[in-house]
Image (cartoon, rainbow, N blue to C red):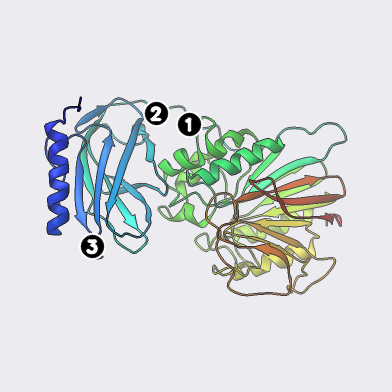
């Protein structure tokens, strides 16, 4: 027996056909559940966008699932993602189907709101926004995270090296991020260094949904994580406030010691703008490295000092590299470039120097890899194939040296080696 078709569903189908034939855009249709909009791109393909959750005019007593469904008819470019907004202000950009996230209503005042969604295509077409009236109940917020202090992670077994996982540019909610999180979990690391960028704009909802909460995505490593901030975290806030709040008031730069290793996290984003030798961060770093007596030092930040990626290096922070070299930094880690790069040891002036600093670039933990746009004889290893599996750095830190591996989610070790420590200041 053929299942009966509801009047609302029939109306949606008829309107989709009509608007597809006429080339008009339609607003959401009153009384139709779920609410849908229909549009035709200049290229001729037809788009149906529906908000299947929450319900139209729903009263939301607390965090609620939001879900959009996208249907395309005709020859269309790839869907880039769905942008969600609340009362016209950006919430979150979801890059991969199913276009679902958790709306944390306690972040917003109780009362009526307009939730909206629009779908973007790689050819540049954005659908008209589909709006959905909802009401937020007065929901108490959960307790804030504890004030940030750098974690020492977990202790390795006696005589075993400290296992450190590192990588950036992955927190986007995509399957690739989940795969990398699983890979890192299989290493049972003692410490995780997230090298910055929560996609797409580092909003509060993206921090909670895409970096994660309650053990999802990279949040499963929160008790052993000491992160650094990326430029995407500044997209909506000149102070990277959602990132700072998520991590319990984390400072832009800090240092800590674990065993024979001194760790330094820095903010080298253009938005922070502290590349000058007179800046507070530079002065702090100079003092920190001068007082450091650890035999081994690892510095990490978001933007690489050396790169063959389309995004330029952090040249306005070059004076920092000179400090690294002068103070015998062992390893320097960065993300930002969505590929893997290992540079030969480089001295203060950027020339190859066996006694210099080794920079490893690993913006590979979830975003699609981006191609190199140039070559440089100082780069010792690298890969940038768009189809390459994502992955992360696995470091094993001993009292006088470090071994490194770049491993992808298939388990393949793409690069490996070791670096000897040269003592503190």
From where the camera sits, is residue 117 visible?
yes
Confirm or deny contact between disc 2 and disc 3 (CB under 8 A): no
Residue 167 in the image: state x and y as whole percent: 63, 50
Q: Badge 2: few (under 14), some or many (20 or more) residues near its Cα, within 10 Å?
A: few
Residue 162 in the image: state x and y as whole percent: 78, 40
Q: Where is mark 2, residue-wise?
A: 141
- Identify the residue shown where x is 48% and y is 45%: 174
Question: Is tag 2's residue or tag 3's residue first in the polypeptide sequence?
Answer: 3
Q: Is residue 246 left or right of residue 221?
A: left
* Quarter in which the N terminus is drawn: top left
* Element assignment for label 3: loop
Confirm or deny contact between disc 3 and disc 1 (CB under 8 A): no
Question: Is tag 3's residue or tag 1's residue first in the polypeptide sequence?
Answer: 3
Confirm or deny contact between disc 1 and disc 2 (CB under 8 A): yes
Eyeballing the image, is 216 above or below 338? above
Q: Where is mark 3, residue-wise?
A: 44
Cα separation between marks 2 and 3: 46 Å
């Amino acid at each position: 027996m053929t299942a009966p078709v509801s009047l609302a569903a029939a109306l949606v189908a008829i309107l989709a056909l009509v608007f597809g034939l006429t080339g008009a855009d339609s607003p959401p249709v009153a009384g139709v559940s779920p609410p849908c909009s229909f549009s035709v791109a200049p290229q001729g393909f037809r788009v149906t966008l529906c908000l299947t959750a929450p319900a139209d005019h729903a009263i939301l007593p607390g965090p609620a699932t939001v879900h959009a469904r996208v249907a395309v008819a005709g020859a269309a470019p790839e869907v880039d993602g769905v942008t969600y907004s609340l009362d016209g202000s950006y919430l979150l950009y979801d890059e991969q189907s199913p276009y679902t996230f958790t709306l944390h209503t306690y972040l917003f005042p109780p009362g009526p709101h307009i939730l909206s969604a629009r779908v973007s295509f790689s050819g540049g077409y954005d659908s008209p926004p589909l709006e959905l009236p909802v009401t937020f109940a007065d929901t108490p917020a959960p307790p804030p995270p504890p004030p940030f202090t750098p974690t020492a992670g977990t202790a390795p077994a006696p005589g075993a090296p400290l296992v450190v996982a590192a990588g950036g540019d992955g927190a986007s909610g995509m399957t690739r991020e989940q795969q990398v999180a699983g890979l890192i979990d299989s290493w049972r690391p003692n410490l995780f260094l997230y090298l910055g960028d929560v996609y797409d704009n580092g909003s509060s909802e993206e921090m909670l949904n895409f970096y994660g909460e309650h053990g999802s995505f990279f949040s499963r490593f929160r008790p052993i994580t000491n992160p650094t901030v990326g430029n995407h975290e500044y997209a909506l806030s000149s102070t990277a406030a959602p990132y700072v709040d998520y991590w319990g008031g984390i400072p832009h730069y800090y240092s800590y010691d674990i065993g024979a290793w001194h760790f330094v996290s820095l903010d080298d984003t253009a938005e922070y703008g502290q590349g000058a030798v007179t800046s507070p961060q530079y002065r702090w770093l100079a003092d920190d490295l001068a007082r450091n007596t650890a035999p081994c030092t690892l510095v990490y930040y978001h933007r690489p000092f050396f790169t063959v990626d389309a995004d330029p290096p952090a040249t306005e922070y070059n004076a920092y590299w000179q400090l690294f070299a002068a103070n015998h930094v062992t390893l320097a880690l960065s993300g930002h470039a969505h590929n893997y790069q290992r540079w030969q040891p480089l001295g203060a002036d950027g020339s190859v120097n066996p006694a210099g600093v080794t920079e490893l670039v690993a913006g590979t933990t979830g975003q699609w890899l981006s191609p190199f746009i140039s070559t440089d004889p100082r780069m010792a290893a690298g890969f940038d194939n768009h189809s390459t599996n994502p992955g992360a750095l696995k470091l094993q830190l001993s009292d006088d040296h470090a071994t490194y591996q770049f491993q992808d989610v298939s388990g393949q070790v793409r690069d490996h080696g070791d670096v000897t420590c040269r003592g503190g200041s």
